[in-house]
Amino acid sequence: QKEVEQNSGPLSVPEGAIASLNCTYSDRGSQSFFWYRQYSGKSPELIMSIYSNGDKEDGRFTAQLNKASQYVSLLIRDSQPSDSATYLCAVNGANTGNQFYFGTGTSLTVIP
Amino acid sequence: SQTIHQWPATLVQPVGSPLSLECTVEGTSNPNLYWYRQAAGRGLQLLFYSVGIGQISSEVPQNLSASRPQDRQFILSSKKLLLSDSGFYLCAWSSGNTIYFGEGSWLTVV
């Protein structure tokens, strides 16, 4: 079983719509959760981190965490063509804080 | 603020040739350092991580090796490249519970 799983997509949404990206993880003891954005040919950049159950909002981005369901999501409101990228979910390992596990990413295309 | 740099940005190497990718971190001390590889259209594969000078943990047995000669320097090497070594190599650092990536190095083995 993979540590972190994401729907690979591709996910297409029209400009101005809400994009919803989902992620599940296997290690119930995981403590830290992250969303990275990766443009084609570039390295991943951190956009959100979340550590406790509930929602965390930052501008147009909202991260949601449900530890009981081992589920993390990212909502992008008012999607823009510049949001078109691959979004990676990452989890910090519970047994050792040195390990980070990444999903394979969800490709998002925002259609003008 | 902390910054991370890796080089070279791109390289094309023949099969059987050696490899050296270098990464340095500035603005922090005693970071955890990582090398990841991302094959085309695939996820991030952790290759090596280091919690200190000379301390290297390998996640995937292969013809690659890593070294950490200084606190903020991490080097990825190979004596003989294989075609399957082609990919996007990412150096990363962490000082706690967040990981940050360098610009990446594109390696094409021909």
Image (cartoon, coloured by chain):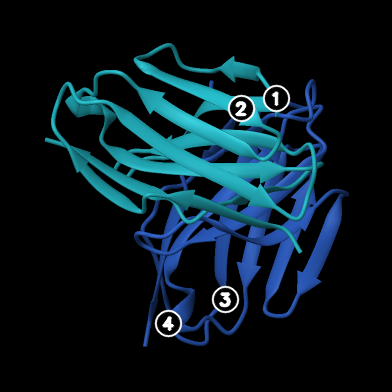
Chain colours: A blue, B cyan
Q: Report the quarter where the C terminus of chain B lies.
A: top left
**Residue A81: mark:** 4
Q: Residue furthest front?
A: B70
Between the C-alphas of marks 2 and 3, the distance is 47 Å
Q: Which residue is mark 3?
A: A18
Lower sequence index among marks 2 and 1:
1
The answer to whether residue A2 shows anywhere in this view is no
Q: Chain of mark 2?
A: B
**Amino acid type, label 1:** Ile
Q: Which residue is mark 2?
A: B69
**Amino acid type, label 3:** Ile
Q: Secondary structure at mark 2?
A: strand
Q: How many marks?
A: 4
Q: Are the residues tagged 2 and 1 within 8 Å (C-beta)?
A: yes
Between the C-alphas of marks 4 and 3, the distance is 12 Å
Q: Nearer the viewer, residue B101 or A28?
A: B101
Q: Nearer the viewer, residue A89 or B107?
A: B107
Q: Residues within 10 Å of mark 3 (few under 14, many from 20)?
A: some
Residue for point 45% across, 19% down: B65
**Amino acid type, label 2:** Pro
Q: Secondary structure at mark 3?
A: loop
Mark 2 or mark 3: which is in front?
2
Q: Chain of mark 1?
A: B
Coordinates of residue B5 in the picture (x, y in percent): 54, 54
Between the C-alphas of marks 1 and 3, the distance is 45 Å
